Amino acid sequence: MYKHCQTEQSAARQVLVEQCLLRELGQRHYDDISVTDLCRLAGISRKSFYRYFSGKSGVLHALLDHTMMELDSILADNSMVFRQSTLFLFFRYWMEHREILDVLNRSSLLSELTERAICFTFQHEMDLSSTPEQQRPERLYRAEFLIAGLIRVMVSWYRGGFRQSPEQMAVLTAAFLPSLSHGMQSVSLP
């Protein structure tokens, strides 16, 4: 995992390591990148690296979580329900951030995106005053199904070369989401 930084300097170092991973993923497979490589590229010691991350997977998780935070801030005004305008912003974001999808795809890591989107949504959007065990299981399963399904549709759209526009994707997905999202008004998109 990774540490949530308290200072600007720590956060900047963490983001630097994340960006080094992203750049390297553009050139090499994830399995071929080491912690030593990331330290060298970021100009930090291994000791400093482990102050921020538990390992290379922690860097990937931080990168994906920070991507989800950026997307969440874009969707903030539209995230209360699965509206067509929210879906448009969701699909437009991913089209504009194709490079992230490209590097994840190249290293067979698109499933990590789905997993982190679900984790992010549960950590940031679900009722944090109760534990998952106290929440209705069907609500949790429905949220997980919706998020994973939406990410999967976006990935298929990406792999298909973004043939439809973000507007068209919003219309397509909005057509089947209302029946699925019944009772999920408090869950936003990842």
Image (cartoon, rainbow, N blue to C red):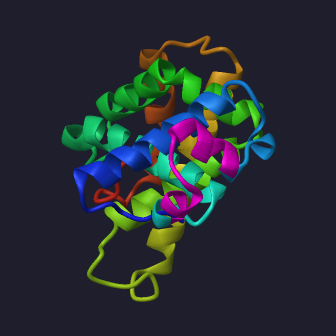
Q: Nearer the viewer, residue 118 or 4?
A: 4
Instruction: Give the camera-side residue of 135 and 32.
Output: 32
Residue 41 on the magenta span: yes
- List x then y, in percent, for residue 183: 36, 62
Q: Name the image quarter holding residue 164.
A: top right
Is 78 positioned to the left or the right of 141 in the image? left
Q: What secondary structure is the magenta-colored segment mainly?
A: helix
Q: Residue furthest bottom?
A: 134
Residue at image x 67%, y 52%?
A: 35
- Residue 78, percent across and down? 24, 39
Query: Residue at 35% of width from left, 28% of height from top?
Result: 89
Q: Is residue 13 magenta?
A: no
Q: Looking at the picture, how far across and down is residue 6, in whole percent?
A: 26, 62
Residue at horizontal 51 percent and vertical 26 percent from the top: 172
Q: Is residue 77 left or right of residue 116?
A: left
Relative to 103, residue 110 above or below? below
Q: Is residue 76 above or below residue 184?
A: above
Placement of 91 over or under 130, stated as above or below: above
Q: What residue is drawn where x is 44% and y is 40%? A: 16
Q: Quadrant of the N terminus?
A: bottom right
Residue interval drawn in magenta: 36-50
Q: Nearer the viewer, residue 136 or 144?
A: 144
Note whether residue 89 is visible. yes
Q: Is residue 176 visible?
A: no
Quadrant of the image occupied by residue 129:
bottom left
